[in-house]
Amino acid sequence: MADHNALPLVILAEKFASLPGIGMKSAQRLAYHVMGMEDSDVEDFAKALINARRNVHRCKICQNLTEREICPICDDSSRDTSVICVVESPKDVSAFERTREFKGVYHVLHGLISPMDGIMPDSLKIKELLARINRGGVSEIIMATNPTVEGDATAMYIAGLLKPLGLKVSRLAFGLPVGGMLEYADEVTLYKALENRNDM
């Protein structure tokens, strides 16, 4: 922002710009919008941020975000716990749940292997996935990472760890565009990709 703007407004815009997908122009618009809000609305907004940050954590089973110790999906006895769908982020769980077709459970990696960005396998929730599998009762792992270089590398790495265990390891049959993101896919495309998954 230009030098003539108040420093707190500049700092606010910079904070918005630090969020993914928010450029400086959008950040400036958001900062100016906040300045036009009622004090009570700004306070409610700030409280919502703090409340989410303090009370939302990772499910101790699947690593999805929840305010409970165990998320509602893991706590649902009607779900098929023998089939685990492995995804990159909590946003991907939400995308699959919108299809209302997947009856298994999930495991959230919280990232993808990307040596260029310093993200190695130990940075992800792979150990937690292996621990779940070692407890028994799992028959299939569906690798549902995005169809990108990092997504494919992560899927292949995990598949390599799981193959010796005698598990069925499948990959989504992507009718999704290569380089696309799961969170932006429509329900029918996601359902078809899930239904036509391939062995790895």
Image (spheres, rainbow, N blue to C red):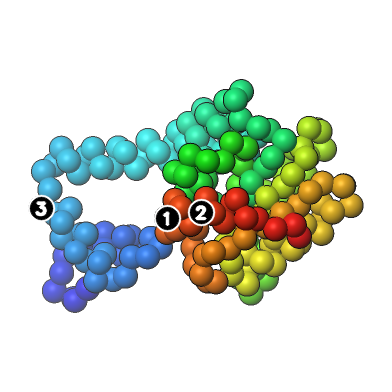
> Is there a contact, CB below 8 Å, between mark 2 and mark 1?
yes
Indicate the amino acid at tag 1: Asp
| Distance Cα–Cα, label 1 vs label 3 | 35 Å
Mark 3 lies on a secondary structure that is: loop
Left or right? Give the position of 79 relative to 185: right
Identified at 19% across, 64% down, the residue is: 29
Q: Residues within 10 Å of mark 3 (few under 14, many from 20)?
A: few
Mark 2 lies on a secondary structure that is: helix
In the rendered image, which quarter contains the N terminus?
Answer: bottom left
Identified at 61% across, 23% down, the residue is: 77
- Picture coordinates of residue 178 (x, y %)? 55, 71
| Residue 53 visible in the shown view | yes
Identified at 68% across, 50% down, the residue is: 142
Left or right? Give the position of 137 relative to 7: right
- Picture coordinates of residue 156 (x, y %)? 74, 63
- Picture coordinates of residue 59 (x, y %)? 58, 35
Mark in front: 2 vs 3: 2
Report which residue position mark 3 lands on.
Answer: 36
| Distance Cα–Cα, label 2 vs label 3 | 40 Å
Report which residue position mark 1 lands on.
Answer: 186
Indicate the amino acid at tag 2: Leu
Q: Earlier in the sequence, mark 2 or mark 3?
A: 3
Of all residues shown, which one is farthest toward the top? 77
- Picture coordinates of residue 120 (x, y %)? 70, 63
| Distance Cα–Cα, label 2 vs label 1 | 6 Å
Report which residue position mark 2 lands on.
Answer: 190
Indicate the amino acid at tag 3: Gly
Q: Quadrant of residue 147?
A: bottom right
**Label number found at residue 155:** none
Identified at 28% across, 71% down, the residue is: 24
**Residue 19 versus residue 182: which sits nearer the camera?**
182
